[in-house]
Amino acid sequence: MNTQQDEQDQHPTPPVGTVVMIQESPISSTSTSSITSRHASRIRPRAAMFDMEEVQLTLDQMRIKEQTIYKRTECDNELHCLWRKMLLEWMYFVVDHCKLQRPSVAAAAFFLDVCMSRGLCQTREDHQLAAATSLQLALKTVDTAVIKLEKLVKLGRGQFTEDDVADMERRILKELSWHVHPPSTYCFLRQYELLIPNGVSDLAKEMMEEVTKIVAELTVLEDQYLRYDPSVLGYATMLLGLEMIPEDVIPVYLRQCFFVRMSAVANLDSSSPIVLEVFDRLQISLDESCNLETVLDAVAARSCQAGIDDDLERYQSKLSRSDIHHTAGTHFSPRDVKVRIGRGGSFGSYDSMSAPSVSP
């Protein structure tokens, strides 16, 4: 376990309600803060920043931490699971309202899960207080600014006071032993993006980011994904993102190169049972989600911007719900992907698209 990161985990968190600036450490990519605090510069030339050994070291550290000090706990109470989802949706509303970063909710979700699993909240009011405090704590460690405490209390509609938030924060920090940098799905996504081949255009990378950040939110909101490690959730999210993007934008041989890098550096195989299981679950979740149209619109708009299709409506018709609707036993998965790559055939569930044939 890395000494520098342990020191970062043990560093006292600033008082409730303060505005903090996050200073990056040499391995700060293992924490959510280093990954989400510079949203505007996520898409940068990979040739200048890609270091396979550094990425591998970072991923190894993050995977150790997700299995030890940041091990996730499943929610086994149906009512609590319902409350959890409602509270996380409230958090997304708050960060949008305050123009903060949505990935911070992933860290807040971890803190909330700790509260729920370790008996820090029993009543509905306790859960509301824990949610507000978890969000405030996550913003301190992830974002570059926090919500003023008085404003947070107002958003809570009088269910708790400033003193209540301060007391709950102390209790959470004690339970966490001051380990406040959980590696989330977003953290792993940012590392996996470094393994995307340089031949993939910046526009294609932006498309991947738009799709994966929407899919990643499903892994935060739905309690069924608590049983899986964020490293696996991140890879399955990347695979689903590739599935949604046409072959015109990311050719087959570049996808295959990414699979090889993931296997070598991240030690994850796209055909492993656990990855396939999560991939199938994500397909179902996305198909049932109201965010599906948002994903399709984003892909269609970016593809038109790239000049792949001059007619946005015509392209969107290719990406209709009927084209990607999946039922049990008929999902397109990485199994199918690897078979089609071997044949030099088309990738993903959009076989009707007229994509150029590219040989590895």
Image (cartoon, helix red, strand yellow):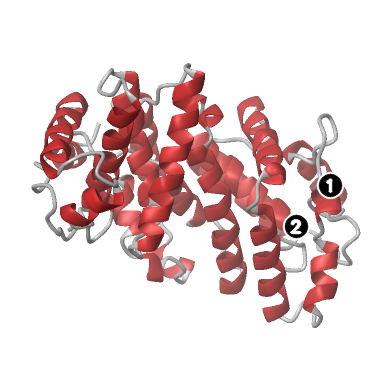
Q: Can residue 98 be seen in this view?
A: yes
Q: Which residue is drawn at 87% across and 63% down?
A: 353
The C terminus: image quadrant: bottom right
Query: The residue tagged with tag 2: helix, strand or loop?
Result: helix
Q: Position of residue 87 (x, y in %)?
A: 41, 39
Q: Position of residue 296 (x, y in %)?
A: 71, 61
Local crowd at mark 1 within 10 Å, few (<14), some, or many (≥20)? some
CB atoms of marks 2 and 1 within 8 Å: yes
In this picture, is 359 found above or below 271? Answer: below
Amino acid under label 2? Val
Q: Can residue 70 be seen in this view?
A: no
Front residue (pair 342, 334): 334
Q: Residue at x 77, y 62 (%)?
A: 247
Amino acid under label 1? Arg
Please give the count of numbered marks on the rendered protein. Answer: 2
Query: The residue tagged with tag 1: helix, strand or loop?
Result: helix
Left/right of residue 302 with respect to residue 12 in the rendered view: right
Numbered tag placed on residue 252 in the rendering: 2
Numbered tag placed on residue 8 in the rendering: none
How far separated are the C-alphas under marks 2 and 1?
A: 9 Å
The N terminus: image quadrant: top left
Left/right of residue 111 with respect to residue 11 in the rendered view: right
Front residue (pair 208, 197): 208
Front residue (pair 180, 247): 180
Numbered tag placed on residue 340 in the rendering: 1
Q: Position of residue 307 (x, y in %)?
A: 74, 81
In this picture, is 309 found above or below 99? Answer: below
Mark 2 or mark 1, earlier in chain? 2
